[in-house]
Amino acid sequence: MPTCTINGQKITVDRGTTVLQAAAEAGFDVPHFCYHPALSIPANCRMCLVDIERSRKLLPACYTDVTEGMVVHTENDKVKQARKAVLEFILVNHPVDCPICDQAGECKLQDYYLAYDAQSSRLRTTKVSKVKVYPLGPEVVYDGERCILCTRCVRFCDEITGTGELTVVERGDRSEIRTFPGHELENDYSMCTVDLCPVGALTSRDFRFKCRVWLLTSNDSICTGCSRGCSIHLEHHRGETQRYRPRFNPEINEYWMCDKGRLSYKELGEDRLGSLLINGATYTWSQGVDRAAELLSERIGAQGKGSVGVVLSPQASCEDLYVGRRFAEEVVGTDRLYIGGKAPGVGDDFLITPDKNPNRNGLLVMFPRGARPASFGALIEDMASGRVKTLYMMGSEIPVEGAERARFLELVGKLDLFILQAPRGGGLSEAARVVLPSCTHAEKEGTYINVDGVAQTAARAYAAQGQALPDWQIFMRMAGKLGRPLSFTLFKQLQQAMLEVMQANTDQPSVESAVGAEAGA
């Protein structure tokens, strides 16, 4: 393990560590454009040049490995002058259109100019004109004049997705990024190139001119598009989600996320249920819960507890599911529990999974093996046979399609009582006698366990829309009105009780330890 000195500070690193990585470990930020830790190292931007004693010239920190006794200077006059010159050349043909550029506020070229250059150009020449607003694919737009040819996007398509759509065409100051003839940038992860672009050359069609980044508030959350549960930054403004960006997590998604997951934020505001409805009339929570509990109690008394079916959704958090299970078993007294959620879809061998529900593992570990909820298909059969006459459904997603979906919708209309507790209508709110509006994952705190058994906590980003409440709070209100209260003074108490149940039900130590860490146990 070689020991080097960086700006007077000694540091010992693993063999094969680059100077840039060693400097970062020592707390020194070496500016760079082309380098990315998940991609190959072309060392073509020259922004990371550093002064290494006994070297005849400045060397790229991203490409140079640390050797024993190496002495590095990352901020002396020689290095600063080199960085200033590199920036001056980069800006020769740059349009400097920061006021209208989507990257303004998170642009590395802006940051480095203010840190190292901050001067007017000494060159008086006509800038080279390049392509503007050029669509590389259905999701990504290219601005050639802003491009600094770092080639991150090209290397991403070559090395990460393996699709190889992008290349550099022409030479010298005429060089630009293009797709190969007959191809578009349309792989399932194409919008990751926008994240990789250090300037405003690649922009998202969805986010383009939508909101200034300095107006956004960012919260750590998860993508609910599939059971991978990618770690994300949920960024919002005035109570509305504006975009998802991948958040680095080496256990789950590293630096990436798929385009469908990235655009799934739109579901948060679609078809929202904002009011508590009974027979189409709007109620306050105090009045509505009284009436909803009365209707449910009447059906239990007339038909028996066994006639009530409860659907739990793998879209919901572990906390919601824990209270939901207790509500079904201890309050309603039924053993007819079923799994809802979204229907399966297409997956790949990278991040996308066929299961489109972020918390199926979280739902399953709420129950002992052999006593887990039945399938949605079993629910349809129980409804058809008359065994289920009252349905309390969590989430409006229907995990079956085609004829089965049509059959379920037909049977729902024949139920004695249908209670829907969901954030979105999903075509079911019209059929429900009671509609209880619940929060999306952006409007509440919650724990989710992904397909690999890794637990994550999604933070509450903004206030709930309308009358929506977290599912667990709705269950507790209903339980209280039914005379069997489920009371937790603090959210952490709920999480602790939930964790104890999950630990008792699972034989997967990785799940136990992950949930314990995330739930604050």
Image (cartoon, helix red, strand yellow):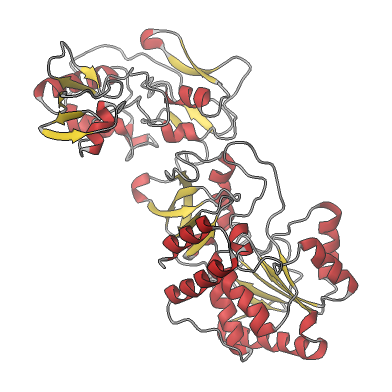
What is the x, y in percent for residue 121?
20, 19
Q: Nearer the viewer, residue 424 or 3?
A: 3
Q: Quadrant of the N terminus?
A: top left
Q: Nearer the viewer, residue 298 or 279?
A: 298
Residue 439 shows up from this direction: no
What is the x, y in percent for residue 253?
49, 42
Q: Nearer the viewer, residue 332 or 396?
A: 332
Up-down: is 467 above or below 99?
Answer: below
What is the x, y in percent for residue 215?
36, 50
Residue that extends furthest to the right in the rendered view of this protein: 385
Q: Nearer the viewer, residue 123 or 150?
A: 150
What is the x, y in percent for residue 434?
69, 77
All told, the count of numbered labels is 0
Up-down: is 439 above or below 54?
Answer: below
Residue plotted at (35% across, 26% down): 35
With 150 as the anchor, is 424 left or right in this view? right
Up-down: is 171 above or below 450?
Answer: above
Residue plotted at (64% across, 89% down): 482
Residue 201 shows up from this direction: yes
With 10 as the anchor, is 386 left or right in this view? right
Up-down: is 521 above or below 59?
Answer: below
Residue that extends furthest to the top in the rendered view of this protein: 171
Q: Quadrant of the C terminus?
A: bottom left
